[in-house]
Amino acid sequence: SMALSRSEHCQMTLLAFGDGESISEERYFGDTVYYVLEGDMPLRLEGHEVRLGAGDCLAVPAQTTHAIGGSGPFKLLQITIQSN
């Protein structure tokens, strides 16, 4: 991963996942947007799995438990913005 910006109110990170890598369930301080750059990204959100492909994006509201990854390799941009 590579942090592009980290401040109190906004975090932007480039992430690259290898085959089978994942991030377990977590919640973020703000609304999080995932933009898939390469590959297919599985995202588990509130008991449902969503698959996003290159060029797709999805917003996850603040404090919503979710997990990403677990299949083939993919790259994404993650942007989290603090909600007030």
Image (cartoon, rainbow, N blue to C red):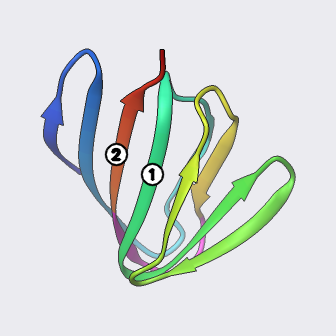
- Residue 70 vs 37, above or below: the answer is above
Q: Residue at x 63, y 26 (%)?
A: 63
Label 2: how many residues lie within 10 Å, few (<14), some (14-19) or many (20+)?
A: many
- Disc number placed over residue 33 in the picture, else none: 1
Q: Mark 1 near mark 2, Cβ–Cβ under 8 Å?
A: yes
Image location (x, y in percent) of residue 58 = 54, 61
Disc 1/disc 2 C-alpha distance (Å): 5 Å
Q: Is residue 43 left or right of residue 34?
A: right
Q: Is residue 28 left or right of residue 42?
A: left
Q: In the image, what residue type sits under mark 2? A: Ile
Farthest left residue in view = 4
- Residue 7 vs 76, above or below: the answer is above
Q: Nearer the viewer, residue 15 or 12?
A: 12
Image location (x, y in percent) of residue 20 = 54, 70
- Disc number placed over residue 58 in the picture, else none: none
The count of marks equals: 2
- On the image, numbered disc 2 is attached to which residue? 79
Q: Residue at x 19, y 21 (%)?
A: 7
Label 1 sits on a secondary structure element that is strand
Image location (x, y in percent) of residue 26 = 61, 33
Q: Nearer the viewer, residue 32 or 23?
A: 32
User: Considering only order in the chain, which callout, 2 or 1, is on the residue closer to the N terminus?
Assistant: 1
Farthest front residue in view = 84
Quadrant of the image occupied by residue 43: bottom right
- Residue 39 vs 26, above or below: the answer is below
Q: Is residue 73 magenta?
A: yes
Image location (x, y in percent) of residue 73 = 42, 78
| Magenta span of residues | 70-76
Label 2 sits on a secondary structure element that is strand
Q: Is residue 41 left or right of residue 11?
A: right
Q: Is residue 80 left or right of residue 63?
A: left
